[in-house]
């Protein structure tokens, strides 16, 4: 039941440190929002451009300004996400408590985190390439889709086995892909259970948030709080816990 224990411990870490959750997440999220809105207004993109039924860009908004906005949006969201993740890893693993309204912005750790995140993404993309040839050979069909689904699950488990290099980078104690793989040998079943439980939990919470959203003001606030802060941080906590268990050999209480 190691997978279940990791999940429970990860959830407990988040709900047991709500003050630190707010200190680590709210400030960066507000800064990101201000920057995005500022760029949006500076580029002169009208609000109508965000409507689903907008057939084309407004005359006042060029394709260039829209492209710049998308690039800035992705950059700001990425930096914010990695800033929060690095700060949370360091808080849990190094007991580096946030002070004030913003967590410490550690550019070197954020850059290292991004580099390893990108490396994992490239590795998984390369590993998935053989399935393209399989699908082509089988011309799709139920057998082909079944094989792709099984292989995709296998790759997700592999990704999580290797993903402990992320918190390692965050705390300045980098480990190699080989070390991550060797330290998680024999726990693929536990990781699969962990992912299934986490997926079910997210589905249940999303259903609850859908109902809460019907409540004026309070429902919206709770939906934003859980949907944009708590759930993503639980996913980060899972990686933190895995690093603590598989690399630092911590015991789960």
Image: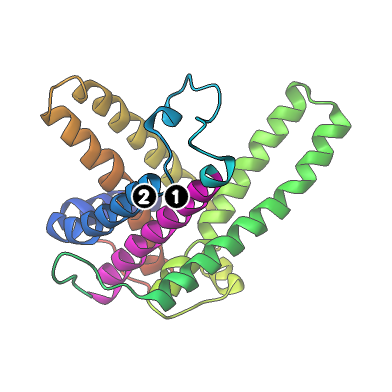
**Proximity of marks 2 and 1: CB atoms separated by less than 8 Å:** yes
Classed neighbour count for the residue bearing mark 2: other residues with Cα under 10 Å, few (<14), some (14–19), many (≥20) = some
Residue 128 placed where, x, y %?
71, 47
Q: Residue at x 42, y 46 (%)?
A: 194
In this figure, which residue is indicated by the disc labeled 1? 73
Q: Is residue 238 visible?
A: yes
**Is residue 90 rendered magenta in the image?**
yes
Q: Residue at x 45, y 30 (%)?
A: 49
**Nearer to us in this view, 30 or 121:** 30
Q: Residue at x 41, y 27 (%)?
A: 48
Q: Is residue 193 above or below residue 117?
A: above
Q: Is residue 153 left or right of residue 134?
A: left
**Is residue 35 rendered magenta in the image?**
no
Q: Is residue 5 visible?
A: no
In this figure, which residue is indicated by the disc labeled 2? 36
Tell me the CA gap for discs 2 and 1: 6 Å
Q: Is residue 252 left or right of residue 221?
A: right
Classed neighbour count for the residue bearing mark 1: other residues with Cα under 10 Å, few (<14), some (14–19), many (≥20) = some
Of the image marks 2 and 1, the number of the one nearer the N terminus = 2
Q: Is residue 130 above or below residue 35?
A: above
The magenta span reads 67-95
């Amino acid at each position: 039941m190691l997978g279940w224990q990791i999940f429970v411990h990860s959830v407990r870490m988040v709900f047991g440190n709500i003050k630190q959750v707010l200190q680590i997440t709210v400030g960066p999220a507000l800064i990101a929002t201000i920057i995005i809105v500022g760029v949006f207004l500076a580029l002169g993109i009208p609000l109508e451009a965000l409507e689903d039924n907008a057939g084309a860009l407004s005359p006042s908004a060029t394709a260039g300004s829209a492209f710049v906005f998308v690039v800035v949006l992705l950059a700001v969201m990425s930096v914010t996400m990695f800033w929060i993740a690095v700060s949370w890893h360091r808080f849990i693993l190094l007991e580096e408590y946030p002070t004030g309204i913003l967590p410490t912005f550690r550019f070197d750790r954020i850059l290292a985190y991004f580099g390893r995140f990108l490396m994992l993404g490239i590795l998984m993309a390369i590993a998935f390439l053989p399935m393209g040839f399989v699908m082509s050979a089988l011309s799709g069909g139920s057998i082909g889709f079944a094989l792709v689904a099984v292989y995709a699950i296998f790759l997700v488990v592999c990704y999580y086995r290797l993903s402990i290099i992320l918190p390692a980078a965050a705390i300045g104690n980098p480990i190699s892909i080989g070390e991550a793989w060797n330290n998680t040998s024999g726990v693929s079943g536990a990781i699969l259970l962990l992912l299934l439980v986490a997926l079910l939990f997210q589905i249940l919470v999303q259903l609850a948030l859908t109902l809460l959203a019907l409540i004026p003001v309070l429902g919206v606030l709770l939906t934003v709080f859980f949907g944009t802060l708590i759930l993503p941080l639980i996913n980060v906590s899972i990686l933190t816990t895995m690093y603590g268990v598989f690399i630092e050999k911590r015991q789960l209480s």
